Amino acid sequence: MSKEAMKYLRENKDKYSHEQLINSLRENNYPEKDIEDSLGEVYKSTGQTKNRKRIYTLLDFRNKKRYFSVKEKAIDFLLGIFIPVITIVIFSFAFRLLGFLASLIAVILLSILVFIRRRWIFYGIITWFSVVIIVFFIILYIIFNSFNIY
């Protein structure tokens, strides 16, 4: 087991995919035994090794997601931004008058659910709410400032 290989894997496991890390170690002429041992040591805490690689799907909310690339984080973040919009539209048509309130409750419950398992979806939802609140206060400021008579 190579300490340099383990250090490289620990530093880059969130930046690059599993396959890219293995290919990079092979290009740097690490023996296969060292690569396998280092991978087993670095990924043992997540239960992910060469033989037992967990495959995540977009709608897998049962298992805690381990992000291996920035692309996966970006996809979940964008999904988190669009989830409130989609739920507001669906609930508004389904429940008419109470739709907006029901959608806010649904988004808050979903946020609690995804906080542990899909952290970047949660960040997207929080970002969406923050932007909406900021825009709301800007509009209020513009409206009330236009009524000032000097």
Image (cartoon, grey):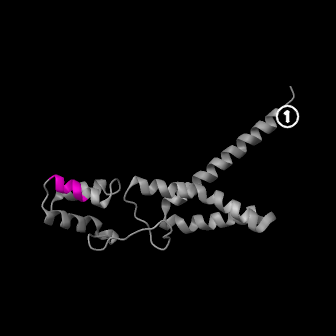
Q: What residue span does the magenta drawing correspond to?
A: 22-28
Residue assigned mark 1: 147
Residue shown at 30%/74% (left/top)?
A: 52
Q: How many marks?
A: 1
Q: Hey, which quadrant is residue 102 in on the image?
A: bottom right
Residue shown at 23%/59% (left/top)?
A: 22
Q: Is residue 113 visible?
A: yes
> Could you say where residue 12 lies in the image, as x and y percent from the top left?
30, 54
Q: In what element is the residue under mark 1? A: loop
Q: Is residue 7 visible?
A: no
> Could you say where residue 38 lies in the image, as x and y percent from the top left?
21, 64
Q: Is residue 110 magenta?
A: no
Q: Height in image: 134 above or below 96?
A: above
Residue shown at 62%/50% (left/top)?
A: 130
Instruction: Give whichever of 57, 81 is nearer the camera.
Output: 57
Q: Hey, which quadrant is residue 103 in on the image?
A: bottom right
Q: Is residue 23 magenta?
A: yes
In the rendered structure, which amino acid carries the disc numbered 1? Phe
> Could you say where residue 133 lies in the image, as x and y percent from the top left?
68, 49
Q: Hey, which quadrant is residue 55 in on the image?
A: bottom left
Residue farthest top in this picture: 150
